[in-house]
Amino acid sequence: MARFFVQNFGCRATQADGAALESLLAGRGFEPAADRAAADLVVLNTCTVTSAADEDARRAIRRVHRENPAARILVTGCYAQRAPQELASMPGVSWVVGNSHKTEIANLVSISNASEPYHGNIHLGNVHVGDILAQHDFLSAPVEDAAGDRTRPNLKIQDGCNNRCSFCIIPFVRGRSRSAPASQVVEQVRNLARRYREIVLSGINLGRWGREPGSEMRLTDLIRLLLAETGVERLRLSSVEPMDFSDALLDLMASEPRIAKHVHAPLQSGSDRTLRRMHRKYRPRHYADRVFKARALMPDAAIGADVMVGFPGETEADFEESRSFIESLPFTYLHVFTYSERPGTPAAQHADAVPTPVRKARNRILRELADAKNRDFRQGMVGRTLSAVTLHDGAALSENYLRIELARSYQPNAMVELRIGYLTDTGLRESPQ
């Protein structure tokens, strides 16, 4: 029996795709391998959000071919969709399958004998990439062991994006926004809820769930349905675009104890001029309105954002406007990214690139600001009792997204109430009393 190994690169959506591929391959009679070295078929499920992500994938291809030359290598995912011939030219690659044909992978490899050693160059017929904008299929399975966290499964319920941010390649490699059927999501959550206390709902643009023509449901409606028809103890939303945090969604999050008090809304920049150049669909005042609304409704909620520094044309005044705006908002954490040119995007064509040392300096300034905000937030939790899910490493994750080191022994995957004793360098410590 041929053995397979799937390696995922990048975001939660890619991990969900990989979990679905594992299920499809197992259903075709392939046997999971413990690692790449033991596999007859190695599937590399790639990311292409930055040039560094591309290099990670190429490095993995070279390593697999060197360490396991008899293995057939199938490269899929976002990099495969964007630059298939670039990957097809690499030694050892047997198939390149874009996101447009990802649902066909189990059938493609079943036609061939995946355990037969591969010699020679890839055939043109083994490149399977089509128009991703015509893609309507939805591929997803729960990710139950993301980065070793076996207590908080991630469920992708939306894919693709209709936005056209000038720095982002994702719409062109994942296609238009499309949603998992509500009945499918309910059934998946119902099954997961039998084994897990907390489930994370995710997507490329999660807030757009249900927005396809003809659909009468929205994300808020789906969440209400999940609460009514499943036994899930806690739902957590991953990243939602700021303008999709409607009053109805925020009101539901605030009033429903089974929804984690955690708001993550990508900001990218607090500069009005930079947001316009990024082709983002909101202005700083719109963003602030959503964040302050969330804080008023949920005083102890985690509030986080993705922020980018060094976007082409970002002046010192632009950056200071962004920094000041971020400082004024009640963030509890930030994910700070340094702009990286992505070929094929409008932003990569701009001639006014910010020098790399300046980008790094701005990144450091915002990280220091984020650290200070996070420490203040954690300090406010000392002496409080927080609801949390226990993890597998002697820690727990609170409802409001704080890591808590445990003072006592708990079974993993349990919902517990923890009294906070003091701060640690990066989290909190449970009081032993």
Image (cartoon, grey):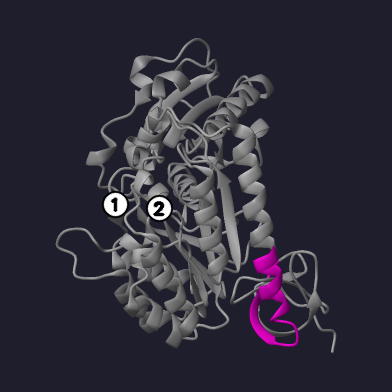
Residue 104 picture quarter = top left
Q: Which mark is residue 204?
A: 2
Task: Using residue 321 as the reference point, say whether residue 127 is left or right of it.
Answer: left
Tags 1 and 2 touching, CB below 8 Å: yes
Residue lying at 40% horizontally and 78% vertically, measured from the top left: 250
Q: Residue furthest top?
A: 120
Q: How far from the left and from the top, in percent, is residue 74?
A: 48, 29
Q: How far from the left and from the top, in percent, is residue 415?
A: 63, 81
The amino acid marked with disc number 1 is Ser
Mark 1 to mark 2: distance in Å?
A: 8 Å
The amino acid marked with disc number 2 is Ile
Q: Which residues are magenta?
A: 372-391
Closest to the observer, 236 or 154: 236
Residue lying at 84% horizontally and 89% vertically, measured from the top left: 433
Find out whether residue 373 is within the magenta segment: yes
N-terminal-most mark, 1 or 2: 1
Closest to the observer, 46 or 28: 46
